[in-house]
C-alpha cells in the first residue's frame, strides 16, 4: 500500500473566518497541521481552496495544490488534489487529515493506513475515542460511532454513525473525523450525490455506508483538539 496524506483547507469558515492562517504561537494553523502530518513519515500535501494557503505552506517547505474554492466538501477537495498530484495513480490510498487539528498526533494518520492494510475488506478507515463524559451520549454535537467490536479489541467494523442519544451499558465511541480511503472508494464516494441519511444526520460518512462501502474504525486514546470557533483558538494558543 502506498498512502498519501492530504489536508483540505479553505479560508471561508463561517465560525472562524481565515481559520487556516490563524496564528498559533507564531505559526499558521495549517502549517502546524502539515508539520504534524509530515512527522508520520508519510508523504503529505495540502489541498487548498485559496492561494494564501498555498503560499504559507510552500513557504514552510510543504507541498500544496490550489483547488476550486467552490468545491462542496473536504472530500471533493481531496479528490481534486489527488488527481492533480497523482494522475498516474501511484497512491492507492488517501488519508484525510483535518487542517483544524494542529496538534494531531502523527500516529493518527498511520493508524488509518494500518487499518486499511490489515483489513482487506475495509474500504474506508476512521478513528474513534472513548466518551469524555456521560453527557456526550445525548449531545448532538458529539458524533457517535456504533461498532461491531468484541470487548478488549482496538478496531471493529462500523455499523452506523449518529448524533442521537445512545442507550445501554456498552461503551460509547466518539467519532474522530479523520479518514483513510482506498482510492477506488474515494472516487466512488465523490461521484455520488449526498444520500438521504447523510442529509438527515448531516454526516458525510453515511453516504459511504449507503453506497455499500465497508467502514472500519480503530480506537485511539483521545481525540485531538479541533479548532472550530474563537474559544477553541484561544485554548490552542494557551496550550502553546
Image (cartoon, rainbow, N blue to C red):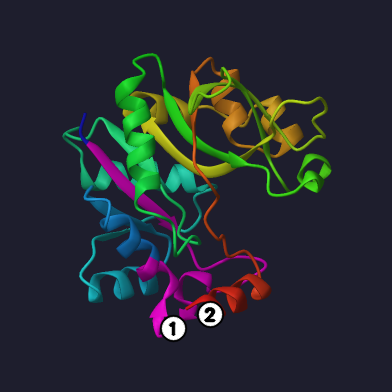
Which region of the structure is painted magenta?
A: 3-32
Q: Quick one: quadrant of the N terminus? A: top left
Q: Which residue is mark 2?
A: 237
Q: Are marks 1 and 2 in contact (CB under 8 Å)?
A: yes
Check disc 1 and report the residue beneath it.
Answer: 25
Q: Position of residue 224 (x, y in %)?
A: 52, 55
Q: Residues within 10 Å of mark 2 (few under 14, many from 20)?
A: few
Q: Is residue 93 above or below residue 67?
A: above
CA–CA distance between discs 1 and 2? 6 Å
Q: Would you identify the image quadrant in which residue 103 lies? A: bottom left
Q: Secondary structure at mark 1?
A: loop
| Left or right position of 172 against 57 | right
Is 158 one of the magenta-colored residues? no
- Is 14 included in the stretch rendered in magenta? yes
Q: Residues within 10 Å of mark 1 (few under 14, many from 20)?
A: few
Frontmost residue, 115 versus 4? 115
Among the 4 quarters of the image, the one containing residue 128: top right
Q: Is residue 190 left or right of residue 35?
A: right
Nearer-N-terminus badge (1/2): 1
Which residue is at 25% across, 30% downward? 92
Residue 146 at x, y = what percent? 66, 25
Amino acid at each position: 500500500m502506498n498512502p498519501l496524506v492530504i489536508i483540505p483547507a479553505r479560508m471561508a469558515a463561517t465560525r472562524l473566518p481565515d481559520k487556516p492562517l490563524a496564528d498559533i504561537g507564531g505559526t499558521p494553523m495549517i502549517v502546524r497541521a502539515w508539520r504534524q502530518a509530515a512527522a508520520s513519515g508519510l508523504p503529505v500535501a495540502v489541498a487548498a481552496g485559496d492561494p494564501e494557503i498555498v503560499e504559507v505552506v510552500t513557504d514552510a517547505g510543504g507541498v500544496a495544490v490550489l483547488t476550486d474554492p467552490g468545491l462542496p466538501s473536504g472530500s471533493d477537495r481531496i479528490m481534486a488534489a489527488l488527481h492533480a498530484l497523482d494522475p498516474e495513480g501511484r497512491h492507492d490510498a488517501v488519508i484525510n487529515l483535518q487542517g483544524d487539528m494542529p496538534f494531531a498526533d502523527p500516529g493518527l494518520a498511520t493508524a488509518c493506513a494500518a487499518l486499511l492494510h490489515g483489513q482487506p475488506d475495509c474500504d474506508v478507515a476512521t478513528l474513534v475515542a472513548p466518551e469524555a463524559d456521560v453527557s456526550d451520549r445525548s449531545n448532538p454535537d458529539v458524533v457517535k460511532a456504533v461498532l461491531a467490536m468484541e470487548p478488549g479489541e482496538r478496531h471493529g467494523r462500523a455499523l452506523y454513525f449518529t448524533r442521537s442519544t445512545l442507550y445501554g451499558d456498552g461503551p460509547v465511541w466518539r467519532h474522530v473525523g479523520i479518514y483513510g480511503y482506498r482510492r477506488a472508494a474515494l472516487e466512488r464516494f465523490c461521484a455520488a450525490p449526498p444520500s438521504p441519511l447523510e442529509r438527515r444526520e448531516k454526516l458525510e460518512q453515511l453516504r459511504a455506508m449507503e453506497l455499500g462501502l465497508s467502514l472500519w474504525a480503530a480506537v485511539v486514546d483521545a481525540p485531538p483538539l479541533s479548532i472550530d470557533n474563537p474559544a477553541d483558538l484561544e485554548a490552542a494558543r494557551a496550550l502553546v
